[in-house]
Every structure is written in C-alpha cells, then in structure tokens.
Amino acid sequence: MAFEPAFQNLEYAVHIQVCFNSVREAIDLSFPFHPTFNKEARMPRAKSQPRHRHTHRQSANELGTSIGPNGYMLDGFLGCSGNKAVTVLWVAIGSALGGAGRYWAFEFVTRQFGDVFPWGTLLVNVSGSVLVGVLATMTGHEGRFPMGPTANQFLLVGVFGGFTTFSAFSLQTLRLIQEGDWWSAAGNVIASVSLCLIGVWAGHTLAVALNR
C-alpha cells in the first residue's frame, strides 16, 4: 500500500515523541536544579495551608533551595521517597560527616588546652546541643525552613548524632574517677548536663525568634 510507509513513519514519530517526553519528565523529577524543573508543580499549596508556611517555603524556593514534592526543603536533593534504604544511606553519610567534624574539633581543642580535662568533648556536646535546638525548631512543620523526614534524619540523627557523643563523655568521666580525680569527674558531669540543656534551650529560643 502506498500509504503504509507514511503511516509507519508517523507511528514511529509518535513513539519517539512519547519517549522524549518520558525522559524529560524523569530528568525534571530527578534533578531539582535542572533548567526545566517546575518547582510550582512540585510544591502544591492547599487552600487551608497557613499563609506564613507558604511564605517561608516560597522564600526558600526563591533562594534556589531544593524543594521536594511535599514542599519540604532538601527533599528533592536527597531523593526523599519514603524508602528506608535511602534514609539509612543518608543517615550513614551524615554520621560520617558529623564524626569527622567531632574528631577535628576534639583534636583542635586538645592541642589548645591539653587532655587533662575533656574540654573537646564538652565543646562538641554543648555546641551540638545549641545547633540541634536551632535546627529542630527552624525545620519543623511550623518553622521557617520545613524539612521532610529524610532530611531531618540526615541532619539531626546523622550529622549531629555523629558530631555529639554521650559515650565519650561517659568513658572520660569514668577514667577521671579511676584516676581519683573526683572533682574533675563531678565538674564534667555537672557542666555537660547543665550546659547542654541550656544550649538546646537557647538554640530553640533563638530559632523561635527567627521564625517570626
């Protein structure tokens, strides 16, 4: 038939167009910073959503932050799909980053003040408590920069969980007791517990003021 080759060519062209559209859509969903990324389509806004939350997410969007399908920061970048394996992977990466930061901070403080008293562990625990207080409040559902569960696990459990250490604090306190330095051991316990609680409260209070 004379029209059969032309019909087949048209059919092939339709298939090619469909494949092209599928590939383009996959790129848009996988790479939030791709030029064709449609952030408005990925961040629907319900009519009942509080206005200030939409304003915060929109401002984060304008800053070029990766917004996931639920409107949470970093979700698009971390590939937050509810997959437990993906979450465990990001927690492991965050723990490695936090642990490396703790090691660097501990070594720096030890060189400056010596290792008679565990100043390095006290510093990372107190500073980590302040940062956790700020981050947990600012990235909550009512915060200025709301984050999804995977991003929160990556930062709170992974990065800051690896940066702070209760086990090192306990071991160092035990060694002070074994060496007979009861005053240093008691001071380490009192300072660590009280300053960490004050730190997380101060971070939370600061974040509440910044959220307004």
Image (tube, rainbow, N blue to C red):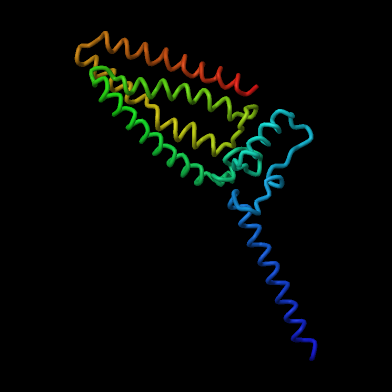
Q: Residue furthest left?
A: 179
- Report the residue at 65% width, 44% height from top: 69
- Report the residue at 28% width, 13% height from top: 185
- Report the residue at 27% width, 18% height from top: 174
Number of dots carrying numbers: 0
Image quarter (top left, top right, bottom left or bottom right) of the N terminus: bottom right
Give x and y (percent) for residue 162. 40, 32
Give x and y (percent) for residue 208. 60, 20
Of residue 198 and residue 33, the one placed in the foreground of this image is: 33
Asked where in the image residue 50 lies, by quadrant, the reply is top right
Q: Residue furthest top?
A: 183
- Report the residue at 54% width, 38% height from top: 151
Image quarter (top left, top right, bottom left or bottom right) of the C terminus: top right
Asked where in the image residue 26 lies, by quadrant, the reply is bottom right
Q: Is residue 144 left or right of residue 151?
A: right
Q: Is residue 145 left or right of residue 173?
A: right
Of residue 44 and residue 112, the one placed in the foreground of this image is: 112
Q: Is residue 205 left or right of residue 95?
A: right
Give x and y (percent) for residue 98. 40, 34
Relative to 161, is 188 above or below? above
Relative to 208, is 41 above or below? below
Of residue 113 and residue 167, the one placed in the foreground of this image is: 113
Give x and y (percent) for residue 108. 30, 27
Asked where in the image residue 48 lies, by quadrant, the reply is top right
